[in-house]
Structures are given as structure tokens and as C-alpha cells.
Amino acid sequence: MQERKLYRRIECADGFSMSVQAHKHAYCTPQSQDAAYYSEVEIGFPSAREELLMDYCEEPQNPLETVYAYVPVGTVTNVIAKHGGIVEGEVPPGVAPLKASRR
């Protein structure tokens, strides 16, 4: 039995952070352990309310303590870009790993 891959929580340049997961037990497409590309992923426990994600929020009344199901990878990429890029962590295949620019 293959152990599921857990991606390290991402932190963006402006301090925003979230978990981005994709594996056979996550809310993602495809629901596969080792897909070469995911078209939708699961977001979990963002550090702040993010309007671009709210359509996918399981508990809109408590957006920091819940998961966001089947979020299109383009939306996730837009969130990462909005917050200045990734300074730490990793994303599943299909999500653009936009790194923060160095100044």
C-alpha cells in the first residue's frame, strides 16, 4: 500500500498561507495517489478569508477552520499570485508553483 503524499503548507510573500492537497482521499480531480496532473485540488485552513476561494468553502461561516473542495488549479494559481507568490511549501502537479520574486 502506497503512503499518500502530503504537500507542505504553502506560505506566500504577504504572509497568507494554506494547505493545498491532492491524493486519493482528498477532494480533488482525479482522485488518484500519484496523478501527473490534477485539475482540481483541496485547500485547507487558509490563514485569512480569501474571496477567490469562497465558492468552494465547506463552512462559509467559519472559513479559516475548514476545507475547500474541488478548487480549480487556475483559481489556486490566482490566489498564489494575488498574495505575491510562494516563499515556502509545495503544491501538487497542475498548480503553477509561482515563487515569490526576490527583491
Image: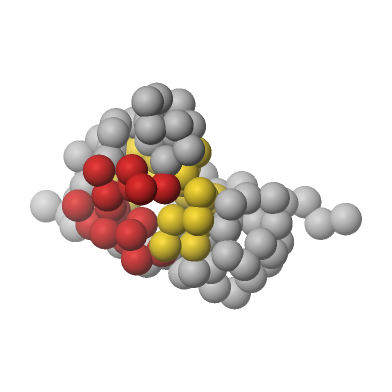
View extreme (bottom): residue: 36
In this orientation, which residue lies closer to the viewer: 27 or 33? Answer: 27
Residue 47 rendering spot, x and y as whole percentages? 34, 31
Q: Is residue 15 above or below residue 12?
A: above
| Percent position of residue 78, x then y | 26, 59
Q: Is residue 9 visible?
A: no
Camera-nearest residue between 15 and 62:
62
Q: Is residue 77 above or below residue 12?
A: below
Which corner quadrant of the image does residue 35 belong to?
bottom right
State the count of labels.
0
- Looking at the image, which is closer to me, 102 or 89? 89
Relative to 100, 66 lies left or right: right
Residue 62 screen position, x and y as percent: 39, 25
Does residue 47 lie above or below 5 as drawn? above
Rendered location of residue 74, percent (x, y): 34, 66
Q: Which residue is most to the left? A: 103
Q: Residue at x 44, y 56 (%)?
A: 71
Can residue 33 be seen here? The reply is yes
